[in-house]
Image (cartoon, rainbow, N blue to C red):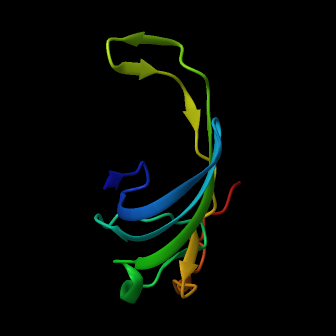
């Protein structure tokens, strides 16, 4: 389970297959959902009220790159890893957006 910086949480489960000692490939299936009512908006647009609690399932193919052991303490080894991947929503979700009339500013003299 993870909390993200854009007010969502996700729950994910996956499988990873080691191709080499420092390279592995995997796939995950997960679910994400927003937990606040703070949504992105612009000067002339905002989320529709019906889509304030957005959620969806996703498929996440990824690779994992690991460094060799940097140091170890007894049976533990410490290293760095990178896990790039793509989050594909299943099915592709939508969120309706309302166009808001721009506010009129007072005349400038």
Question: Is residue 21 positioned above or below 56 on the image?
Answer: above
Give the quadrant of residue 80: top right
Taking the spot 40% from the left edge, 51% from the top edge, the residue there is 4
Query: Is residue 55 toward the left or the right of residue 101 in the image?
Result: left
Give the camera-side residue of 61 and 44: 61
- How many numbered badges does the structure rendering display? 0
**Eyeballing the image, is 86 above or below 91?**
above
Given residues 20 and 108, the one toward you in this image is 20
Residue 71: x and y in percent read 47, 10
Q: Residue at x 61, y 26 (%)?
A: 67
Q: Quadrant of residue 89?
A: bottom right
- Image coords of residue 106 (percent x, y): 60, 63
Residue sitting at x 58%, y 85%? 92
Q: Answer with the quarter of the image where residue 12 lies.
A: bottom left
| Residue 18 appears left or right of 79 | right
Expressed as whole percent of the image width and height from the top left, the position of residue 103 reads 56, 71
Residue 47: percent from left, percent from top: 47, 78
Quadrant where the image shows the C terminus: bottom right
Asked if residue 66 is positioned above or below residue 28 in the image, the reply reads: above
**Quadrant that contains the N terminus:** bottom left
Nearer to us in this view, 69 or 57: 69
Identify which residue is drawn at 50% across, 74% down.
Answer: 58
């Amino acid at each position: 389970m993870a909390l993200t910086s854009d007010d969502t949480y996700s729950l994910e489960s996956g499988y990873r297959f080691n191709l080499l000692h420092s390279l592995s490939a995997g796939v995950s299936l997960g679910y994400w959902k927003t937990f606040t009512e703070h949504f992105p908006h612009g000067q002339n647009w905002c989320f529709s009220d019906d889509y304030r609690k957005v959620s969806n399932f996703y498929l996440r193919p990824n690779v994992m790159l690991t460094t060799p052991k940097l140091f170890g303490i007894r049976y533990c080894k410490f290293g760095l890893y990178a896990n790039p991947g793509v989050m594909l929503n299943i099915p592709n979700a939508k969120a309706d957006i309302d166009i808001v009339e721009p506010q009129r500013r007072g005349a400038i003299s």
